[in-house]
Amino acid sequence: MSEIEFRTTQVDLSGLMTVLGDHLYSTPTVALRELVQNAHDAITRRRMESEAVFDPRILVRADRDRGTLSILDNGAGLTRDEVIAFLATVGAGYTRTLRQKTASDDLIGYFGLGFLSAFVVSERIEVRTTSYQSPHEGWLYRSRDGERYSLEPCEPGPVGSVVELTLKERFRPLLEGDELRALLERYCALLSLPVFLGQDPVAVNAVAPPWRDESLAGTALTAARKAFAARFERRFEPLCVMAIEPTAECDVRGLLWVQDARTYGTSDNRNLAVFVRGMLLDDDARELLPSWAGFVGGVIESSTLTPTASREDLQRDDRWKAAHAHIVRALIEGLAKVASSEPESWRRVLLRHNEALLGCALCDERLMDLLANELTVPTSEGDLTARVVFRRGDSKAYVSLGTRGGFEEMLFRALKTPIAAGTRYGVLPFLRAYAERKGGAVVELGTEEGNRHVFKSAPLPADERAWLESLLLRPGQRLVAARFAPEDLPLVLVPDRDAELKARIESDEADKRIGAAALKLARIYTKTLDGSVQADLYVNVDSPAIRALVAGRDRGAAACEPAARLLRSLVALMAGWNEGSGKVDLQSALSDFTQTACALLR
Amino acid sequence: MDIWSWVRARRKELISEGNARLAELLWALPDHVVDLRHHQVDALVPEAIALSRARKDPWLELFFRHWELQSRVLTRMHGEGALSSAVDLVDFAHRPETEGCPQSVCTIQDLAACYGIVDGPGWADERIEVTAETLARIDPSWGCFDCISAEHADALRDARKTDEAWAFLERQVAAKLAKSPDGELDRFCGMTRVSVLSDMGRDEDALALVDRQLAGREDSVNRTLLRKAHRARVLARLGRHDDARASLPPWSEFVDAVDGYDVWAECALLLVRAGALPNDAALGFTIGTMLSRLDKNGAVRSSMLMAERHVELSLSRGALWSARRALAVMERCVPRLRKPLDALDRVRRARERVASRSSEERFELPESAEALLASLSNGDEGREADADLPLLEAARAKWPADEPLLLSHASALYAAGAREDAIAMLEARVREGDPSDEVILRLGNALLREDAARFEAFDRLVSERCSRVEGRVLPGFLQGARAIGEGRWAAARDGLRPAVEARPDGLNARRMLARALLRDGEAGAREALARLAEVEAGGEFQRSDHWDRMSAAAIVGDWATARASAAALSLKLTSDEGPIDERWELCTLSFEDEDGTHEFIAGRTGPVTARVLHVAGVGEPQRFGDQWVFDARPVNRGPDEGADEEERKRHRWVYAAVHCVARGGFRTVELDGARPTFDQFDAFAAALEAEGIEVRQGGGDAYKLTDPSDPSAKIAAVYVRLAVPPSIDDRALGALLDRATEGFAHPFAWPALAEAIGDEAGIEAHRARAKTYGVEG
């Protein structure tokens, strides 16, 4: 019994350690987590198997000078045979055996690989252990690589184990500063047993998560939630916090919060910490949050979610789906509750995340209910709520898509009717969804549909029309008599996009750049288009200038011709200002304008 | 050419230029497309295109426009409606500035696919030709080799050249393998290969292939759903009905996978025929939804085939009306097909089936329309929406003049999704002349949400065909009621007034008008009181009427009337007569201006009045001390049912301010300085408040000014905003401030006030202080 035994772990470890190091247990924090879990499970085991009363505690100690990290527990400890059976046999952790025997949810560990993960970050590991079954024996396990180890008797200590890792050089910064504390605070936050660090008499997990503390209510509960959230949200302050309550279908509970940082559109700052059986399993399970919630963080716990073999992710099974749905519901209901009971926070949520929320509202009907009247869209008159946009547009929302309609925009600016910036994230579909829900129409400026809304057709006697056509039209243009505001705007020229497309596709030049078969297919479409009209000239019958022009015709006034030339130049100048309207000859318009002005002055 | 390496390179480049937003969109859009987040696609595409144009980057614009078409055409099955965009993009992609873009080739596929969606078999030859032309330009290393090969094979399938399609696919697989021997090829042209194998009767092979596809690495949401649907269809064909049902994704998950509707519906039909899936109303709803979506998108051939399935399923569960509607869709599709092919036969067969079932249909109509309506409302709970429609049609033929029957029929049509039919029926009734109020209101309500032109036409029609003035005012009434909901108060008054004048019985019109009149000054309030008196005379004075009456009375200063209503509502007031000016709880007043809604904290001074407590900054209108009457309907919701005492106490009601009864006349003055001690600040504030000046302190811990003893250091500072009553002029205020800040270790600066006072020395002194402490102007 007294000599040192040299043994080999019962599996080929050389390959496995690489896998552990590279994939399964990738960081020293994971090793720390695994060892705390082992300590926790050892205590649970002692409580289940032994009658003895003891005050359970886990202590983590860092010794910077020696480069060691120790985890002490007063759990069950191990006998010699158990060291061989459980500590040094891959896949045979005692936890698994015990869980199979007792079906206990208090046990965290899963695969028995946990202990080996410590070798990824250590030069050397020593374990001193004394089992409650043989309190007068002590065992010292020592190994450098987990593969070959020595086992010898030693002075028995108090019942329990001390695992001492001598960290590899590059992992030693973990022992400096507050990093270790911050890690333990996060990783052990939900563990029910106290975990102490060094000499500190207060456990790192002394504050219970607010959902477990039934004594909290009202503002105290809100404050506790916010403080707890702040421990998990590393990049931002939590702006408001929402609870996730378990239901009969899903045991997930925890907190969600909105981040106090400005997001834009599709920014994705989601983060979600997932605790399974009290241990932090996944630090960034963002996929459990809805994809639209780019400004939300959270922390949850569940005993039903299933970890993957790497223990750093969750399996996407039915429970995962149920948890996802549960969290989405909690988030939406939580936001509604913030809206009703925390108006100041809600204002800030809207202010911070308006753009992102435009997208959210589109993704979920319930959010649209909540947000339809709250969100603003950028318009030519400033940021306005959809309600104001529709009100000021007389039940219509005018939207510019930037391509064309530069001209109509000018028209609306003159009328101080807001034009929403359809080129900004989410604006157009949000306004459409709003109109669908509350009534009203969305008018896209620069489209045929939009023009119908802007220019109301008006009757014009045939002879007047013919005369105006002869005076005002250029080849390829069509005159449309209409009423529109402002009255001081006599004419508007709107190019026909279909005709332009037809001209381009059917031109000889297209043969050179587009493949024959593709061009054939494209031309089959453009053949269906009527390309005879290249642009519509809208004549405002309410305009004093047009009325005077028509009256001038009746009197046979000589000024009709130069006046018409001026008006035509005006159209050309305004159309020329609108980039992309093609064939307007600016030079001749300018010269027409100048000559007419000179003629009037002569 | 690998498009994704191009995307990665562009992304890096954009990020290094500081254009993170475009970089983000470049990554996000394809993800949203293949994971079926259609809303997100629609939300970000206009922005992405605009940003690309702003930096004059045609390659990026092409990329975004192509992916938008991928979403609209390939996943959402837009056919006819997307042709114009697809042609436009082909043109754009083949200009000198874009032809080198690796995404340029893909636009041809967008166009070919678009025609394929309109009428796959009808355009098969052209699609074969165009994809062959494109394939000649690329090799298997291109990302689009897969898509265009699949498009080519699909076109061959549509041309019923199944063997040729398979041979072609095998050649493409071999070519791909030669280029990348290690590549995983099960998913290459995956769905097409499964379909062609099925067409060839090789269902077992098809199953094995789709199983391998599903087993591999994670796939997009869309492809996963489609593969599962394909798998289900193959299983159904193999007679493994239970497995098929298990593999078919539930409709709730499949809604957005429009490109899989054909496969899903065909599988469902096979299962129904085999008795393995119930042919219930829910299935009818699903197929009906698929049909209307495809039809709306201009996916003509698919619509026709979906309608054919809908006819079969509807007939077999006795939903004759749905079958007729689906038949109408089939008939509507035929002339829009490029080549009818077997469509005419299909329509003929469907027509015969419907006709034969219709001839079997016998209705036992009761003795009166009234009895029929009574029996309908006693119908089964689980009855399909369209179950009553054939009966209603028969009844209408028998009692064409019966109005309750007409209204029920219209409602049933509306509920069954036949909106236009319901509207047309009501319109016909108005056109016949002398429609009842009910008919006008029903039609008006249905049209109100449509475009304005349509409502105007309805208004004209009613005024032509309705001889009763009471009926003619109803369209205006509806518009007025809607304007109330939208906060267009002037329009509401215009719409409602004729109704109020024409209809002495119109109590609701009066109530609404009174509410709109609260926003029309004192004259409006006086009229509101008169209208509410008419409501009271009508014998139905409600609690909300009392609240509105209090608001109107407060505006005109009729405190006796306001007190009477307060008493009727059992509100406790501290005084018995005269103006109501008490200290109630805090509230928020909401002001709707032209540029939006502004909210300010206020102290409630009575049931419908409040005084603004917010002290505005320089440059904003100062509302402090203004007294407002508000509309007593809260703008926000009350505290939650589960809220505790504390939360209830914290909850603050928001009311819409309607009329200012007294201006406070306060003006804003701002001061800045290093933070004095707490006691000093308290004394300073108390001295000002004693003169009726309202003091607000700002800045918080983060606010710092320059330390005069060490210009490189900062000291804690405070800024103070004052609302000053008109009784104190600038000079008096200056003197008061001098006294109140005496003894401060650091002097406060108020350069703007000093300028207003106009004393040169004072101006100099405060400018110097501002400069020393680094106060921003």
Image (cartoon, rainbow, N blue to C red):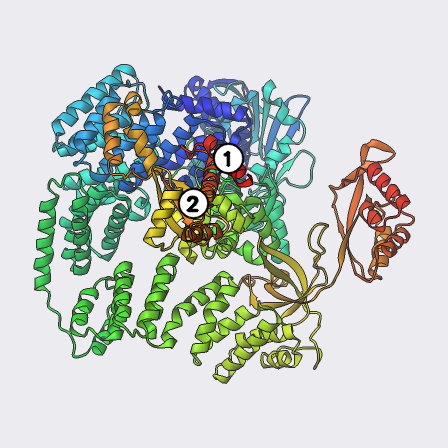
Of residue B552 and residue A208, the one placed in the foreground of this image is B552
Viewed as shown, does residue A524 lie left or right of B582? Answer: left
Q: Residue at horizontal 39%, vertical 29%? A: B62
Question: Which residue is labeled 2 in the image?
Answer: A324
Which subunit holds the residue at mark 2? A
Q: Give the image location of residue B740, x and y in percent.
A: 88, 53
Q: Give the image location of residue B375, x and y in percent.
A: 22, 74
Residue type marked 2 = His
Q: Give the image location of residue A5, x and y in percent.
A: 51, 18
Which subunit holds the residue at mark 1? A
Of residue A414 and residue B539, the one placed in the foreground of this image is A414
Residue type marked 1 = Gln
Picture layout, residue B260 above or below residue B357: above
Q: Is residue A582 visible?
A: yes
Q: Give the image location of residue A600, x and y in percent.
A: 53, 41
Question: Which residue is labeled 1 in the image?
Answer: A595
* Res B725 → quadrant: bottom right
Element on which disc 1 rests:
helix
Q: Residue at horizontal 46%, vertical 32%? A: A588
Q: Which is nearer the N-term, disc 1 or disc 2?
A: 2
Question: In which quadrant is the C terminus of chain B drawn?
Answer: top right
Viewed as shown, does residue A117 lie left or right of A228? Answer: left
Viewed as shown, does residue A525 lie left or right of B450? Answer: left
Task: Find the distance from the CA under tag 1 to the CA under tag 2.
Answer: 72 Å
Picture layout, residue B116 above or below residue A240: above
